[in-house]
Structures are given as C-alpha cells and as structure tokens.
Image (tube, rainbow, N blue to C red):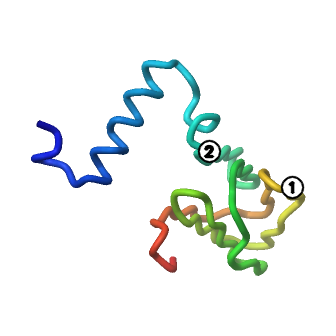
Amino acid sequence: MCGIFMGREQEHEHIREKLISAAGMPKDVVLGASVITVLGTSEVCIENYRGILEYTENLIRVQTKERRIKLSGKHLQIAYYTNDEMKITGRIQTIEFGDRRETL
C-alpha cells in the first residue's frame, strides 16, 4: 500500500529505516549517515563526510553521502580532518542543509 503514495526511492528508504529501527543499530553505522555535532557558535564536527567543496574564511561547503552542508561565518578554518571526520572552528553564523543536487 505504501507504493501508491510514495515514489519507489521513498518506499525503499522507508523500508530501510524500518529495518534499521528493528535491528536497533545506529544509522551512522548502517547507512554511513553523517553525524554533525555543533558546540555553541564556534565549533562544528562532521563525521562521515565525502569531500570539501569550498573552503574560504567566510564559507565552507562540505559534501556528505546524503546532502551538502554550507557553513557561513567569520574566521572559519578546518582545525583538522581525517578520511571520515573534520572539525571546523571560527564564528559560525549559519548552517544550511541542501540536497545532493543543490549547489548551495
């Protein structure tokens, strides 16, 4: 019955969500979903990212598996990054989430 109201991709996502929920496993482990931790207005940690799209003192754009993330502010810098985690510091003013196809 779900197929009548949802597109095929949405239906698959819905089924995946139910399986993950039933298994009791975290989404970041099973699906590789991003984990974003915000500490005040001066620090953001992003786990499970795919790449850095843009990096300036006022703007950092990051690609994750599911979407693009845009951080705006002042004196932004990537304090460190590894293959799957990064820490951004500075005066963070906005965090925007777009989808994979958006350029943000």
**Above or below for 31 versus 66:** above
48 or 22: nearer the eye?
22
Q: Residue at x 69, y 62 (%)?
A: 50
In the rendered structure, the answer to whether residue 22 lies left or right of residue 79 reads: left
Nearer to us in this view, 33 or 42: 33
Reading the image, the residue beneath label 1 is 82
Q: Is residue 99 above or below residue 18?
A: below
Residue at 83% over, 64% down: 78
Amino acid bearing label 2: Gly
Determine the image quadrant of residue 41: bottom right
Q: What SS does tag 2 mark?
A: loop
Quarter the N terminus occupies:
top left
Crowdedness of circle 1 by 10 Å Cα count: few (<14), some, many (20+)? Answer: few
Amino acid carrying label 1: it is Thr
**Image position, residue 59 (x, y; %):** 68, 76
Q: Secondary structure at mark 1?
A: loop
Spot occupied by residue 36 in the image (x, y as percentages of width and height): 64, 47
Residue matched to label 2: 32
Camera-nearest label, 2 or 1: 2
